[in-house]
Image (cartoon, coloured by chain):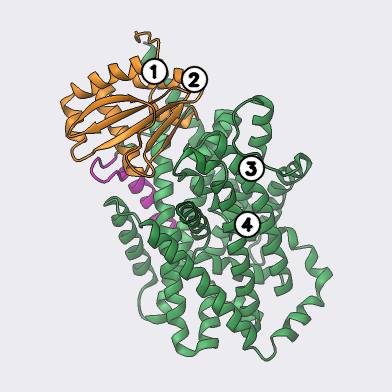
Chain colours: A orange, B green
Amino acid sequence: MTKEYTSLAECLEDFKNTFNSNGRVQKLIKNWNRSVIVDATDTGSILTMMIKDLAMYEVKPGAHPDEDYPIHLQASQETLIRVFSGDYNPAHALIDGELAVFSNEKDKVKLEAITMVIWGM
Amino acid sequence: MKKFIELMFYVSFGAGMAFGTSSFTMMSGLFEITTVLWVVIAIILSGGICILISNSVAELASMYPSSPGIRTYLKVAFDNRISLLLVYLYLIFMVLVAGVESYMFALVAKAIFPHASAMLIVLGLLAFTITVNLLGFELPRGLQIFTTFLLILGIIVLGIFGIFHAPNGFSTFAQSAGENLRQLKVLPAAIIMAVYLFTGFEWVTLLGFSPKSYERRIPVSMPLAILTNMFAYTIFVVGMSFQIPRAEIIATPVPQVPYFVGMLGSSGVYFAWAFSLLAVFSTFNAGIMGGSRLIYVLTREGNLPKWCAKMSLRSGAPIGGILVLGTLATVSSVLVVTYELELLAAVIGSAIVSVVYAAFMWAVLRLRKAQPNAKRSFRTPVAVWLQWVIIVLMPLMGIATLFSQVGMQYQPIIGMVIFTVVATIMARWSLVRTANQQLRRQN
């Protein structure tokens, strides 16, 4: 049963804990220091997950790109919450046209791999 | 400046995906059914139709940015069965193109090394491309822009050179204009065959750097890529017809070789080979990568066995997809080389693409009805009635093309039927697989 979240921020904070407590994720994100912008198109809620030195150290309100073209996830708030709580396979969300992921191919693969490691999807 | 470079990357990617070594084979095929004036008309009309279609693709991409293109667009607009059928047909098209491309590369290489085995060259090229993709090497953006620019500029320069260094060129052109009415009836087939020359422009929709890219830069890049290729092809076919007789163009699937040799002497063959190498960079490699990602996407949905989605966590290469597509491309190449099926494969490929492109346009109209309030950062300016004309005409012309080939009798239509049956079986199998997976999850 998926936990009910009242906001995207609350969901991402929970995700941060799951992310940081998983040893296999830490192996995956070696030398992967990135900021991931999470953008809810229907509510206008925008947060950035800051990843550095093998951990997600902060979920910041607003967009904080670390380079010209950062990783940018876009969907409705409900879809984002379902994706970050493990209720909706992000690969399926992408194919269904519910989620947009703007990044280079290598970062897309990294995100896919993190999903597989955390939820076995 | 940054936006301009981004746009140039999209244009070069779209133009490069469409411009392969087999483009020259299709030019030879066009000359086989009609004369130079009508080849030019077919290329221009075909490019025009592709520009109209690209507007529909841009609207779909603006609704589903960064999605895996064809699978998502057709899945949201149509029944899953139809979507899968068309996606598998499109994959078959990619496998056919891989076979034709590799064989044409081998034929050009054989012009330099006449004693080399075409089969060995083909297998070597495939082994090289598959290895490069398995290792996850990608062409840097700057190099992508540069190689495509070099390829197209070279083709235009040599085309212009051919036009202005032909003593009897314009009289040949005038002669072909005398046969106009007789040639008019093969125009629909020539237009569909020429669609092959532009196919691939739509792959750029997967590459948008940011949400903003789908508002203007991606929609503008596709017509620009098509116009660039349209200009290059037109100049090239006119130059070629000025330099060598039509019979000589028809006699070979690599007409660029006798054209360049006739114009530049024995060193011309090296130009032909250099262009083939550039085309391998832009079309062949990117095609294998794009096709393998499509297989990966289908597998992640549960449509194909899990091993097809095996991926390298280090390089990000979709290993399973590359091996599946690489194997199919090898089988296709061996068959094309052994039985010299290059034009047959390219013609069937054109017919498949004409159906898929019509489906893209239809998808836009269906989604406008089904989801009128969905966000669209770009809307195709093409009138609805014109879209319907293209939706109806493209598949009909595609079928007509299968009957219009000189000396092929029923082979194209039989081939098309076989591939449609294969795609139908694959779609049915995938649906059963996903239904069973859902049942297992529920239990």
User: SS of the residue at dot 4?
Assistant: helix
User: SS of the residue at dot 2?
Assistant: loop
Residue highlighted by disc 1? A8
The tag on residue A43 is: 2
Q: Residue A74: where, in percent of width, then height?
A: 45, 29
Residue highlighted by disc 3? B56
Say if labels 1 and 3 share a chain.
no
Say if labels 1 and 2 share a chain.
yes
Q: CA distance from mark 4 to mark 3?
A: 16 Å
Which amino acid, mark 3?
Ser
Q: Residue B220: where, in percent of width, then height?
A: 59, 50
Indicate the chain on which mark 2 is placed. Answer: A
* Proximity of marks 1 and 2: CB atoms separated by less than 8 Å: yes
Residue highlighted by disc 4? B195
Query: Which residues make up the magenta segment?
Result: B311-337
Which amino acid, mark 2?
Thr
Say if labels 1 and 4 share a chain.
no
